[in-house]
Amino acid sequence: MGIFGRFLNKETDKEKTVSLSEINEYFRRKGEGVGSDLSEVTYFTCLKVLSESLGKLSIHLKDGDGNKVKDNEVLELLALRPNPFMSSVTFKTLMEFNRNHYGNAYAYLKYKKGSLVSIVPFKPQNMSILVNNTRDITVDFSHVYQYTEGGRT
């Protein structure tokens, strides 16, 4: 009889009771049955719930005095459709997931003729941050973001 069979059995014989250490050992085992997947499933379920919850929230922009700003091109894109392939909720959900899972989230602001036309999310795994402490890369910036995809930078 397996460990779950012991839990479900209504008899309370001494030989059929399960100690707390046996239960802990069952869930501590790696590479066997449900125990190895339990923490991973829980982690990604929590990430999904958190990301989707924040993705559904509306975005408000306020100025220094606390007044709502209504005419802002970034705010309009984030509220309606950041890019042709994503809705606002999908974009915010993905950015929140990346922030929680990878530690940061990145997006490319695409401009056309001086106005913002789309906001495209980047894969955080492909992003490198180069710290420019000797000013060898450029004089203007203290750090540079480098995105690599398919061998191209």
Image (tube, grey):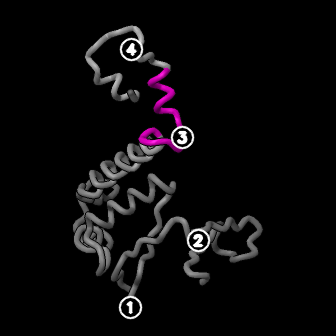
Q: Mark 4 or mark 2: which is in front? A: 4
Per the image, the residue denoted by label 1 is: 113
Q: What residue type is labelled 2?
A: Tyr
Residue at 50% across, 57% down: 102
Mark 1 Cα shell of 10 Å, populated few (<14), some (14-19), many (≥20): few
Q: Which mark is residue 145?
A: 2
Tag 3 or tag 1, which sits nearer the N-term?
A: 3
Tag 3 or tag 2, which sits nearer the N-term?
A: 3
Position of 81 relative to 11 (above/below): below
Per the image, the residue denoted by label 4 is: 17
Instruction: Locate the N terminus and report the quarter of the image it occupies.
Output: top left
Measure the alpha-carbon separation of dots 1 and 3: 56 Å
From which residue to which does the magenta span run?
22-35
Q: Position of residue 9 (x, y in %)?
A: 29, 20
Tag 3 or tag 4, which sits nearer the N-term?
A: 4
Measure the alpha-carbon separation of dots 2 and 3: 38 Å
Per the image, the residue denoted by label 3 is: 30
Circles 1 and 4 in contact, beta carbons < 8 Å: no
Measure the alpha-carbon separation of dots 1 and 4: 74 Å
Q: Can residue 71 be seen in this view?
A: yes
Q: What residue type is labelled 3?
A: Lys
